[in-house]
């Protein structure tokens, strides 16, 4: 194989860690964490969609699409459970329990079309909070 052929083949090699079941499961989870349209929970219906007093957002505008978070499956503990498994599988290290979240590492194992869903889910689930532009993991009940 020539040096040029070797360089070209390296460009098309896929990181095999992306095919690991916990990583695939996290991407599937992230894809299904949101439903189409604005939130239709009783609070949102009662306030005609005004979420100004909410601690965590219910509805999102992502890439021009109106979505809502599926509450039944996206509590902070649910997100943490699938994230921990994917993180460990991909990095071979435990996800830090508290502190700054390395978004670059997280994005490395999330499908590019799902990147726009990461931060909204982490914030809306209460798993993380934004501190001066940095996502910080928070303690979860049961940890």
Image (spheres, rainbow, N blue to C red):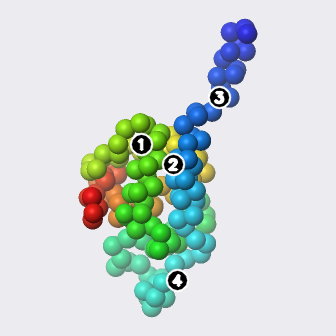
Q: CA distance from mark 2 to mark 3?
A: 20 Å
Q: Residue 102 appears in which quarter of the rendering?
A: top left
- For mark 1, what is the residue? 88
SS at mark 4?
Answer: loop
Q: CA distance from mark 2 to mark 4?
A: 31 Å
The answer to whether one can see residue 124 in this image is no
Asked if the residue under mark 2 is in contact with the one under mark 1, i.e. CB atoms within 8 Å, the reply is yes
Query: Which label is found at residue 22?
Result: 2
- Depth check, mark 3 against mark 1: the one in front is 1
SS at mark 3?
Answer: loop
Q: Residue 123 appears in which quarter of the rendering?
A: bottom left
- The residue carrying pointer 4 sits among few (fewer than 14), some (14 to 19) or many (20 or more) residues within 10 Å by Cα, namely some
The answer to whether one can see residue 14 in this image is yes
- The residue carrying pointer 1 sits among few (fewer than 14), some (14 to 19) or many (20 or more) residues within 10 Å by Cα, namely some
Query: Which label is found at residue 44?
Result: none
- For mark 4, what is the residue? 40
Q: Residue furthest toward the bottom?
A: 46
Residue at 44% in and 49% down:
85
Is 59 or 92 nearer to us in this picture?
Answer: 92
Residue at 52% in and 78% down:
39
Which circle's residue, 3 or 4, is located before the other in the chain? 3
């Amino acid at each position: 194989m020539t040096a040029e052929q070797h360089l070209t083949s390296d460009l098309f090699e896929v990181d095999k860690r992306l095919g690991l079941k916990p990583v695939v499961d996290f991407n599937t989870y992230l894809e299904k964490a949101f439903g189409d349209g604005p939130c239709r929970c009783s609070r949102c219906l009662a306030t005609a969609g005004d979420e100004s007093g909410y601690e965590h957002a219910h509805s999102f505008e992502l890439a021009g699409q109106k979505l809502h978070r599926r509450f039944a499956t996206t509590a902070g503990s649910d997100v943490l459970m699938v994230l921990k498994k994917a993180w460990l599988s991909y990095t071979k290290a435990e996800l830090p329990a508290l502190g700054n979240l390395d978004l670059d590492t997280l994005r490395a194992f999330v499908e590019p079309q799902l990147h726009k869903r990461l931060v909204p889910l982490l914030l809306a689930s209460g798993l993380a909070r934004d501190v001066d532009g940095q996502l910080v993991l928070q303690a979860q009940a049961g940890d």
